Image (cartoon, coloured by chain):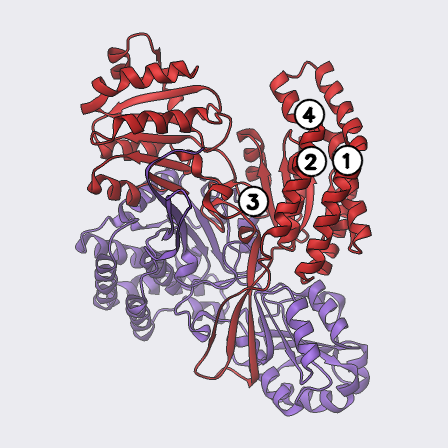
Chain colours: A purple, B red
Amino acid sequence: MNQIRKKAELARRASEEIMSISEEIKNRYLVRLSEKLLNAKDYILSENEKDVRYAREKGTKESLVDRLLLTEKRIEDMASAVREIVALPDPIGEVIEGWRRPNGLYIEKVRVPIGVIAIIYEARPNVTIDSLALSFKAGNVVILKGGSLAINSNIALVKVAKDAAREAGISEDIVNLIESTKREDIIPLLKMNDLIDLVIPRGGYGLIRTVVENSSIPVIETGVGNCHIFVDDTADLEKAIDIVINAKTQRPGTCNAAEKLLVHRDIADKFLPSMIKTLREHNVEVRGDEMVQKIVPDVVPAKDEDWETEYLDLIIGIKVVDNVDEAISHITRYGTRHSESILTNSYENAEKFIHSIDAAAVYVNASTRFTDGGQFGLGAEIGISTQKLHARGPMGLRELTTYKYVIRGMGHIRK
Amino acid sequence: MNQIRKKAELARRASEEIMSISEEIKNRYLVRLSEKLLNAKDYILSENEKDVRYAREKGTKESLVDRLLLTEKRIEDMASAVREIVALPDPIGEVIEGWRRPNGLYIEKVRVPIGVIAIIYEARPNVTIDSLALSFKAGNVVILKGGSLAINSNIALVKVAKDAAREAGISEDIVNLIESTKREDIIPLLKMNDLIDLVIPRGGYGLIRTVVENSSIPVIETGVGNCHIFVDDTADLEKAIDIVINAKTQRPGTCNAAEKLLVHRDIADKFLPSMIKTLREHNVEVRGDEMVQKIVPDVVPAKDEDWETEYLDLIIGIKVVDNVDEAISHITRYGTRHSESILTNSYENAEKFIHSIDAAAVYVNASTRFTDGGQFGLGAEIGISTQKLHARGPMGLRELTTYKYVIRGMGHIRK
């Protein structure tokens, strides 16, 4: 606890120091960081090897070990991701709005850093560098708590990042790692409202709930996506098959992958057999409601809990609905406000869907997989926010900032 | 608990209903509400009388009873505040940004309501109508929990608001009152993340801490302002006296009133005697550090806790500092990130203060009393946010909204 508080205090001080440094200094640091990552490859790989060996000894699933594993290529990717952040424009200092009041007071709304951001994440060590680099470019200091399996890798990466800071002549406390391997050790961190401005959990549902339920600091929830595609009766059914396959199978482990397919009753007979056949050709397990089972008898019957589950896997739940209204009600009830798509040629239904669906991203005739900072053209992102406060959808550099009002007077007093 | 959950469920449903209603319908309701408040004056006054009588029986301070008291004039003020909100432009539906991607996807960032907002507040019954009207104009539904002393007044006001909703043909669940008089009854409400999108506490430090520490729903903190004015050695000392008097005494009970005065060492001898004399003529109690005591021997010695106290009263703490850097450190340590002002004629010190002070509103040569939605030209406000997420400073209609991305494709899939 005291160790953690001390780190948070150092972070707060570093934040005061870097709050208004120039883009030049920030970029100099990031360039240095990307070079040092490449130079320190052997050291990072050997520390990562310890984590990988320990994970295998513990009998960790190979898919998880793979997320943990670093290779020369993956370190090079990290370094080039940092260089891409160098190229992004600095959001800090932007005058978002400015106006003069009738009494002559001049008011500006200016973009400034948030301050100290705690980022709590799971297996992948590249998140360490990504989070730090993106947050830093927006003028923020990070306190990182990675997954227990990646502890040696994370210590090595943070050491490299701190070395780069010293060499660039800025405080090494711009990045701080909580070296504990126990999740409960984050609890005191989540109460340090005086030192930490924002907590971002990046990971699965369990991690996010722990953070949301225990934090008195503002949290931005990221990532849980029980995304739906609704195929309306007027949809182009050939394109619909392409879109569903793309949304389900292009990267099934991501939060913007489609998890549910809703199909208009009037086209179910015609559409479902070929849709399900194609899904199966892509190794997708299909779970259907009673209507779907009638049309394609050998699908797995969907259970109630299927409708609320984010599979993150090659599984899809399919339900037949009466019309766009039932689709909207179903999504309102079971969706996680991430990404929802309607495939239709009806102007009226498209507009109804757009206005009635409450989600970070609402699509017409497109795959849900586009919900992504890069795909939106916003640059690198730190996650996809599924809550409504502060930032919604892909969170890039701008979403890692806040603003303050600057008011210039000439002896003004309030009348 | 079940009663409260049921109300939150009704609120959620009403929110789905009003999420995209037109400005016309919203204004029709607000006009109806302001008329009904005037028509129901006698009923509201007689219910308010019960609260006032009970408060006096309990021996409540007269200043608090006055905050509770409604009069014909105060009800008329409420009604006209509602009519002013009618005149404000509807923020919903604004396309904040829109762009086309190289692949032809068209992306819009559209302003939408937050959804269901719980507002927890203390004595003044006018907050009931203000909060409801402003939130509603931004398309939101409110769940209100007022102070125990105002319970009968609040029940009456909410009854009028619900009647107006029925008459305007919209759900009466756009406003919901938690009728309990115990503060701990809000705890379950603060955990209903599935039904409530945002909690805004409006009141003193104790209320705000209870909400922040217990809520798993996002909270916007409002109101605590330990605001400073720093008088630099180059300040116009005559104007400085006017500004300090304005900031301290114009309305000492508000969060943007100055609580502390920092004075540059080199002008302390010259400035403090007349400054303190004028403060005393305005009935302000002066508490000073050792240097201040040396210069004006009969001031009350300031204790350590004075530097962190928001008096909300005719009291001011005064400290002599070496220079702008010490002023900045002091404010960074003790300020509440509300409103901070430097009085100077030094360009360098003004810029340094602006860049180094981390607060919602940073002033040069003006009174802190301007931190207010109306004074900024933003229209009515629901409070002053002192945190950094979502909204900072005065929270008007726009700050009661969020956005969603609307993405229109023509069969787009991610490559």
**Residue that numbered label 1 is attached to:** B155
Q: In the rendered image of this protein, does residue A272 appear above or below residue B85?
A: below
Q: How far apart are the two marked residues, 1 and 4, measured between alpha carbons? A: 15 Å
Q: Say which residue appears at 27% left-offset and 18% top-offset.
A: B272
How far apart marks 3 and 1 lie (CA) works out to 24 Å
- Residue that mark 2 sits on: B76
Sequence-wise, which precedes: disc 4 or disc 2? Answer: 4
Q: What residue occupies the far front of the structure in this picture?
A: A102
Q: Is residue B49 left or right of residue B396?
A: right
Determine whether the residue tagged by mark 4 lies in a helix, strand or loop.
loop
Q: Is A112 on the left or on the right of A261, as rendered? A: left
The answer to the question of whether label 1 and label 2 lie on touching residues, with beta carbons closer than 8 A, is no
> As drawn, which residue projects farthest toward the top?
B298
**Can you see residue B41?**
yes
User: Which residue in the structure is indicated by mark 4?
Assistant: B69
| Separation (CA) of disc 3 from disc 2 | 17 Å
